[in-house]
Image (tube, rainbow, N blue to C red):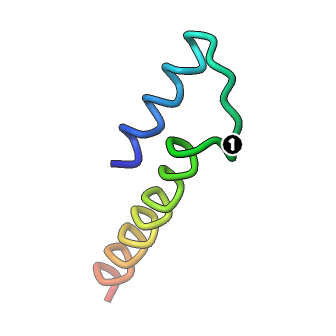
Amino acid sequence: MAAVLFVVSAGMTLWGAPLLPTSAPLPAAGYPFLVLTFIGWICTLLRAAR
């Protein structure tokens, strides 16, 4: 989900749309999904280490 939102944001930037990190909804919506992905990845790695 995060990757899709960031790809759309990158596409908008390439087409010349003014896009800031605080622009809603795309970049602002992508970061929570990215953090959740990192948390899930960390939990998976910690479980595999046990």
Q: Tell me which corner region of the image, top left, top right, bottom left or bottom right, holds residue 20.
A: top right
The secondary element bearing badge 1 is classed as loop
Judging by the rendered image, the residue that carries numbered circle 1 is: 21
| Residue under the point 57% across and 51% down | 28
| Callout 1 amino acid | Pro
Q: Does 4 appear above or below 13?
A: below
Q: Does 18 appear above or below 15?
A: below
Q: Does 28 appear above or below 42?
A: above
- 16 horizontally vs 8: left or right: right
- 18 horizontally vs 50: left or right: right
The quadrant the C terminus occupies is bottom left
- 2 horizontally vs 15: left or right: left
Residue 9, image x and y in percent? 52, 30
Residue 40, image x and y in percent? 36, 71
| Residue under the point 63% across and 11% down | 16
| Residue under the point 44% across and 29% down | 8
| Residue under the point 51% across and 45% down | 25
- 18 horizontally vs 43: left or right: right
Of all residues shown, which one is farthest toward the bottom?
50
Residue 6, image x and y in percent? 48, 37
Q: Does 24 appear above or below 11?
A: below
The residue closer to the viewer here, 50 or 5, is: 5
Of all residues shown, which one is farthest toward the front?
24
Mark 1, Cα crowd under 10 Å, few <14 / some 14-19 / many 20+, is: few
Residue 43, image x and y in percent? 37, 78
